[in-house]
Amino acid sequence: MTLIDEKNLQAQLKTGELSNLYYFYGSDILAVENCVRRIVKAAGGPENVTRLDGQNLDLNQLSEDAELCPMFADYNCIQIHDCNLETMREHDRTMLLDILGNVSGQTILIFDVTGFDIYAGKTGKNKKPSAKNKKIIDYIDKNGTVCICEPKSASQIAAEIIAKVKKQGCTIERPAAMALAMQCSCQTLMIQNEIDKLCAFVNGGTVTEQLIQEMVAPALETTVYALTAAVLKRRAADAMKAVEELLALRVEMPYLMAVVSGCLIDIQRASAARKDGRTVQDVMADFGYKFSFAVERSFRDSMGETPEHIAECLNLLCDAEKKMYSGTVDERVLFEKTVIEMLRR
């Protein structure tokens, strides 16, 4: 089998064929949950599913359950939620892979990840599952179905937003729908929550771009892009406002610095590409980007920038990370000082 997305999973299910092994992961949590629901429904419904906590997995019990043949249903369906192989002992990881190789023909094992960062803080080109989790993903990819649920493009989501708003008896113009998608970093779950809130507020009226700016809190990535753009343009007030918003989110500092670094790397690539006369499509092809909106935004933010200036900022972030791991420091103060140093470059 090959790695697929949510759309291809829907097409696969229409054929009536089910795999014995499924693995669902990705940044779009709602899409992951929707995929699991589709498999559960196809396997006989939620009443026929055994749900297991992957963080406290009894492998002996799983081994027994995986070999059972159902008596009153077509499939023996088992869902294993948030099984993180990085936290398991080597013996348990080996045992789990052995179990996957011995499931009965009528058993469906569903692994889904929504409660931990399977990418271990990696972003951009390096955004791949951590090494130990990748082992089980590779195994299921060869012997079943792996579905990656990443955000769609802003253009794709804008059409979905318009349809969802209309379904709730309200209206929204395409520019406003695009703004909502960008404000939420194309995260389906966040977008759905904001649609419910905005439609309740306008009560049959129109959701405007101004209303979105006033009522929708930007996602982490959106605020990080605002920070990096302000830093590179040396807009100190805007940069420190973004810092306050990011710190208020109480994100773990190593992850936050990784996201900021990833954003700057995107912009550095765009700057180098612009200097060499390359296009958005060239950068997407060269670095394996799946969605154009992030690259387009990087091209916009790289206007007038040099790769060398961005490299200076990245070096400051690198030094900050070394200090963070080398001893006891106030991480919030360290982050603020690093941003101030970047503004001075």
Image: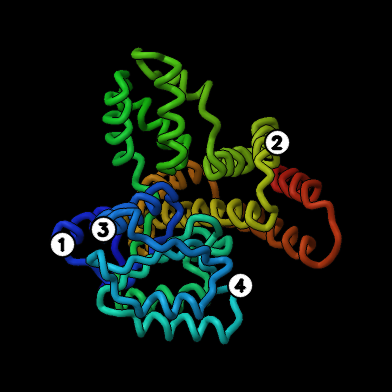
Apparent side of residue 24 relative to residue 43 in the rendered image (left or right) = right
Residue 115 image offset from top left, x and y in percent: 54, 56
Residue 266, compared with residue 286, is above or below; it is: above
Q: What element carries label 1?
A: loop
Front residue of this view, candidates 98 and 339: 98
Which residue carries the number 4 mark? 87
Q: Is mark 3 on a helix, strand or loop?
A: loop
- Sequence-earlier tag: 4 or 3: 3
Residue drawn at x 38%, y 76% as measured from the top left: 66
Whole-angstrom CA distance, mark 4 to mark 2, is 33 Å
Type of the residue with mark 1: Gly
Density class for disc 4 (Cα within 10 Å; few <14, some 14-19, many ≥20) is few
Is residue 239 among what the camera can see?
yes
Residue 81 is marked as none
Type of the residue with mark 4: Thr
- Sequence-earlier tag: 1 or 4: 1
Type of the residue with mark 3: Gly
Whole-angstrom CA distance, mark 2 to mark 3, is 49 Å
Which residue carries the number 3 mark? 44
- Sequence-earlier tag: 2 or 3: 3
User: Comparing marks 1 and 4, which lies closer to the viewer?
Assistant: 1
